[in-house]
Image: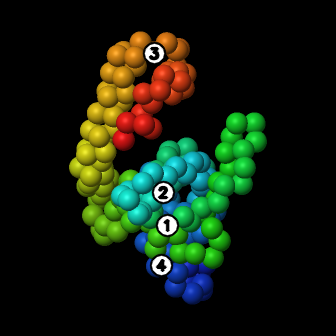
Amino acid sequence: MSVPTEKDVSPDKSYLDKKYFINPYVYNCPFCNRRNLSYELDEVIDFDWNNDKKCYVHFVICSSCDKSSMHLSYDCIAKHHGAYSAIDYWSFNQDIDIDEHIFYSVPTSFFVLDKRIPKIIRELISEAEGSLKMNFLTGASACMRKAIYELFVREKVKGEHYGDKIKALKGKGNSPSELH
Ligand SMILES: [Zn+2]
């Protein structure tokens, strides 16, 4: 006779296995393929999806494997707790179903695919899906970088780093913010 495990006696919480985020501190890592791991909300940036809608991009780091995943939401669901020694502190809001507010994640469907499908196949599907959807964004961001680089050359902007050049460009009057 086998000894009852915690799984046998605790209420069925298998629905949690299908989730990405359990709460602001615990999630199921798609890279480790391990459940109930702690994570860190590393960074949140926002941009204008269109004239009346913002989109928030969340970067989450697994505390076990250190890999970073990306999650898009139209809702402001995270708080900034300030910056200390150049590190920003963020966390998802309490008392919300984080998954409900996220419309797209990379990696994507790892936990949705049936566990009977071999792990390697699930990984490949999930990666293919991710890169297919991300091709557009990668292409778009490459084009933007190229455009900004062209602007640097044209305006003869000096500066060692990308950030310095952007600042120098702002001083020139033809800043990108005036061009859109
Ligand atoms: Zn992990």
**Relative to 81, is 48 on the left or the right?**
left
State yes or no: Cβ of the residue under disc 1 lies below 8 Å from any atom of ligand 1.
no
Q: CA distance from mark 3 to mark 2?
A: 31 Å
Label 1 SS = loop
The residue that appears at 27% across and 52% down in the rendered structure is 133
Residue indicated by mark 4: 14
| Between discs 1 and 4, the one toward the N terminus | 4
Relative to 76, residue 163 above or below: above
Residue indicated by mark 1: 75
Query: Which class describes the residues within 10 Å of circle 2: few (<14), some (14-19), or many (20+)?
Result: many
Residue 157 shows which numbered tag? 3
What colouring does the structure picture have?
rainbow
Q: Amino acid at mark 4?
A: Ser
Q: Which one is in front, 54 or 64?
A: 54
Check if mark 3's residue and mark 2's residue have beta carbons within 8 Å.
no
Check if mark 2's residue and mark 1's residue have beta carbons within 8 Å.
yes
